[in-house]
Amino acid sequence: MRTLQHIKALSELSETLRAKGHPAKAEALARKALSMHERLLGEEHPNTTEYTMKLVLELQRVLGEDQRGTAASINNLACCIKDQGLYAEAEPLYQQALELQRRVLGEEHPDTANFMNNLAICIGAQGRCADAEPLLRQALELQQRIWGEEHPDIAHSIANLACCVQAQGRCTEAEPLHQQALELRHQVLGEEHPDTATSINSLASCLIEQGQDVVAEPLLRQALELQLRFLGENRPA
């Protein structure tokens, strides 16, 4: 169990470093955690009849925890690699993490939807938005079943879908999605939030692509004002 705790700590530290903008350091820790997971699976897999029933059940319990950790470690490693712009290398890792997550926790789980979103974003970043769109829609439908309609993750997924649709040149279809994401972020996050400013800017961009510059201008001004306000709040004293 100490090994599992060590692996979990490495994985969490990796994610913290990635979030703070240190993808190379995060990748090294994620790879180390993943290697430890694989060694543990190989050493403790209950694949013989020599174990007593009690021991087999205990090992299956440990294996279950380990598989969940393995999926998270693979996903964290993929995130670190993606953050370095290595999308093609990250994609199969995201796919592997998603497949393992589905086997361990099933389709109807929030983390499954999150992993699905991660894979879709990685695919879209490679210019394959048509391939990413079905995954984004599937993840959104799953999150709506789990969380309902009023949750920050729902707004994030709608925003991702809107950008994906817009990137394929379907701006008239993307516009109401941007609007929906913005309204939901206003509702669950408030106006004074960076994600709300991002949605305002995205909606304005979509309107500009449709030639609605006059409508987009006040939105751009609003987004800029919010972003400058956030920058001021985060500026070192």
Image (cartoon, helix red, strand yellow):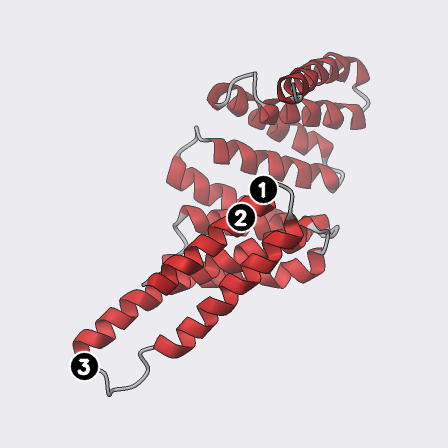
User: Which residue was labeled with disc 1?
Assistant: 19
3D distance between C-alphas at marks 1 and 3: 44 Å
Q: Residue at x 48, y 55 (%)?
A: 10
The residue under the point 67% across, 49% down is 83
Label 2, secondary structure: give it. helix
Q: Callout 1, which amino acid?
A: Ala
* Tag nearer the camera, 1 or 3: 1
**SS class, disc 1:** helix
Q: Position of residue 149 (x, y in %)?
A: 43, 31
Vertical comparison of 66 with 119: above or below: below
Q: Left or right: 184 with respect to 91? A: left
The tag earlier along the polypeptide, 3 or 2, is 2
Q: Which residue is mark 2?
A: 15
Q: CA distance from mark 2 to mark 1?
A: 6 Å
Marker disc for residue 52: 3
Type of amino acid under label 3: Thr
Q: Is residue 69 above or below residue 170?
A: below
Residue 138 in sight = no
| Residue at horizontal 41 percent and vertical 73 percent from the top | 41
- Between 8 and 207, which is closer to the camera in this rendering? 8
Q: From this view, report whether residue 198 is shown above or below residue 153.
A: above
Q: Amino acid at mark 2?
A: Glu
